[in-house]
């Protein structure tokens, strides 16, 4: 079981969002992937893939390209087994050094054991100056 489990309340939906935010901010692909079902179905912008191993590979590539990644998630809405979030994250391009802030939305669907079985994500990147960073700055 991956607590909290559906059906969600305001409190448990907020707990799920905070747990996801903390896991993603760890930048540990295995830790993040462990929250998803074995056959989790993902759309990440224009990429589609299924399963924990694909999620892990995606995240490893992501964090090689997106340095100093720092994320903020906000609960948008929830139902029995679904949660929608708004998010922002900041990162530095590993090739160009340019900083970005990414704005987006995610829709999550959970199985009865509390694992995310579906993730649908849309986002846009905005180039920023390092002085415009506003999400918790951490040392790398």
Image: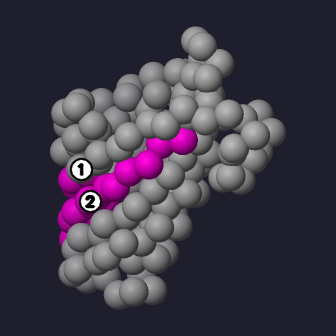
Q: Is residue 136 left or right of residue 101?
A: right
Name the side, left or right, on which 84 lies relative to 27: left
* Disc on the earlier residue, 1 or 2: 2
Task: Identify the colour scheme used.
Answer: one colour
Q: Relative to residue 114, is residue 139 depicted above or below?
A: above
Q: Which is nearer the eye, 98 or 41?
A: 98
Q: Are marks 1 and 2 in contact (CB under 8 Å)?
A: yes
Residues 9 and 47: in front is 47
State the extent of the magenta-drawn residues as a range.
101-119
Q: Residue at x 72, y 35 (%)?
A: 130
| Disc 1: which residue | 120
Query: Is 99 left, or right, of 4 in this rendering?
Result: right
For residue 135: magenta? no
Of the 4 image quadrants, the one containing the N terminus is bottom left
Residue at x-position 24% and y-position 70%? 82
How far across and down, in percent of the image, does residue 40 sit?
Answer: 22, 47
**Could you say where residue 8 lies in the image, as x and y percent from the top left?**
31, 82
């Amino acid at each position: 079981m991956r607590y909290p489990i559906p059906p969600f309340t305001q409190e448990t939906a907020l707990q799920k969002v905070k747990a996801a935010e903390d896991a993603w901010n760890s930048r540990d692909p295995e830790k993040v992937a462990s929250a998803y079902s074995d056959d989790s179905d993902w759309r990440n912008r224009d990429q589609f893939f299924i399963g924990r191993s694909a999620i892990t590979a995606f995240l490893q590539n992501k964090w090689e390209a997106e340095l100093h990644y720092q994320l903020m998630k906000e609960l948008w809405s929830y139902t029995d087994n679904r949660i929608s979030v708004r998010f922002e994250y900041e990162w530095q391009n590993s090739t160009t050094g340019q900083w970005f802030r990414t704005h987006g939305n995610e829709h999550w669907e959970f199985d009865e054991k509390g694992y995310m079985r579906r993730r649908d994500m849309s986002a846009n990147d905005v180039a920023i100056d390092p002085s415009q960073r506003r999400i918790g700055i951490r040392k790398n």
